[in-house]
Image (cartoon, rainbow, N blue to C red):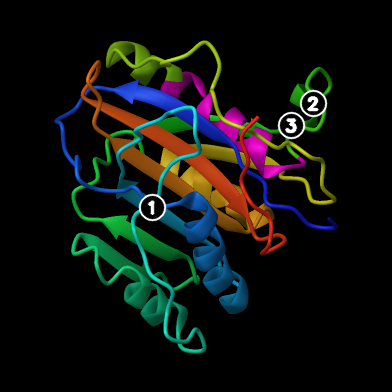
Amino acid sequence: MAKRLFIAALVFVLSGVCWGQERGGGDADVAVPLIMNVLRKAKVSGSLEYWGNCSNMRQFPDFPKLKAPRNDVGAPVETLREMFADDPKMQVTQEPGGMIRMVETDVPQDLLDLTIKHISFGVEYEKTNPHTFDNPGSTLWFILAAPEVKAFMKAADIGLPYDSLGLSMEFSPRSQRISGDLHEVNLSQALDYMLKTFPGLWTYENCPSQKRKRVVFFAVYSSGDPAAKTRQH
């Protein structure tokens, strides 16, 4: 395919209250194309923050349950609101710059609000780690590996449930390449910056856990081939 859906996900185990037990359960193979089709037609990017169930962390993240719109020729915000109509917690808004936010009102913001002092998408790193910044998958990985994120994880007893991520990840090189430096930005702002080079959608899923109090998945989906699907190795 000339264009492909790029997915990268990082799984964290976080402390928190056991919310959202009855949420999620939506099929990514259904939800991703529906959401991406709306964003693609409007030529905008978006973010999705929600509670799921993460019943099998070796599968791709589940999504909120949504329905296909009756038509998708209207404003993207209205179309997405119709799709999420059965989720009373979901709020869909559009910022002046065009970014669309899909956020359940009770999603914890502690990790997304974490301040990162400096991120450099520079050539020096790529001398030993080639192609890090020419695809959204490894760019997401790089952002989530910021020292502040690691320190936050350690201080809050955050860890990985498996030695590996347990999720299929695609890191195919592209013609675009993210560059520049960020100073004093929070994690969500860094994720937004990624989408300026790789338009699409980043997602932040929270789930209850028996071992910890919540599990969090991050993923990024590129505005590529609408027929592309997630897959597990």
Q: Amino acid at mark 2?
A: Glu
Q: Nearer the viewer, residue 139 or 148?
A: 139
Which residue has dot 1 on it? 26
* Kind of residue at badge 1: Gly
Residue at the location (49% across, 70% down)? 97
Q: Position of residue 65 (x, y in %)?
A: 34, 58
Q: Secondary structure at mark 3?
A: loop
Which is closer to the viewer, label 1 or label 3?
Answer: 1
Residue 133 in percent (x, y) is at 73, 37
> Residue at 60% of width from left, 77% of height from top?
41
Q: Nearer the viewer, mark 2 or mark 1?
A: 1
Instruction: Return the mark for residue 132.
Output: 3
Is residue 118 or residue 158 the one in the foreground? 158
Name the magenta segment's main secondary structure: helix
Q: Which residues are magenta?
A: 134-149
Q: Quadrant of residue 128?
A: top right
Upstream in sequence: badge 2 or badge 1: 1
Q: Please state which of residues 137 and 66 is positioned toward the viewer in this rendering.
A: 66
Residue 119 vs residue 210: left or right?
right
Give the x, y percent position of residue 215: 32, 29
Does dot 1 land on a helix, a strand or a loop? loop
Amino acid type at circle 3 is Thr
Tell me if 177 is positioned left or right of 181 in this view.
right
Residue shown at 61%/46% (left/top)? Answer: 230
For marks 1 and 3 on the same chain, the one whose residue lies earlier in the sequence: 1
**Quarter of the image with the C terminus in it:** top right
Q: Which mark is residue 11?
A: none
Say which residue label 2 marks. Answer: 126
Q: Is residue 186 visible?
A: no
Image spot of residue 72 (x, y percent) = 50, 84
**Mark 2 and mark 1: Cα distance apart in space:** 37 Å
| Quadrant in the rendering for residue 55 | top left
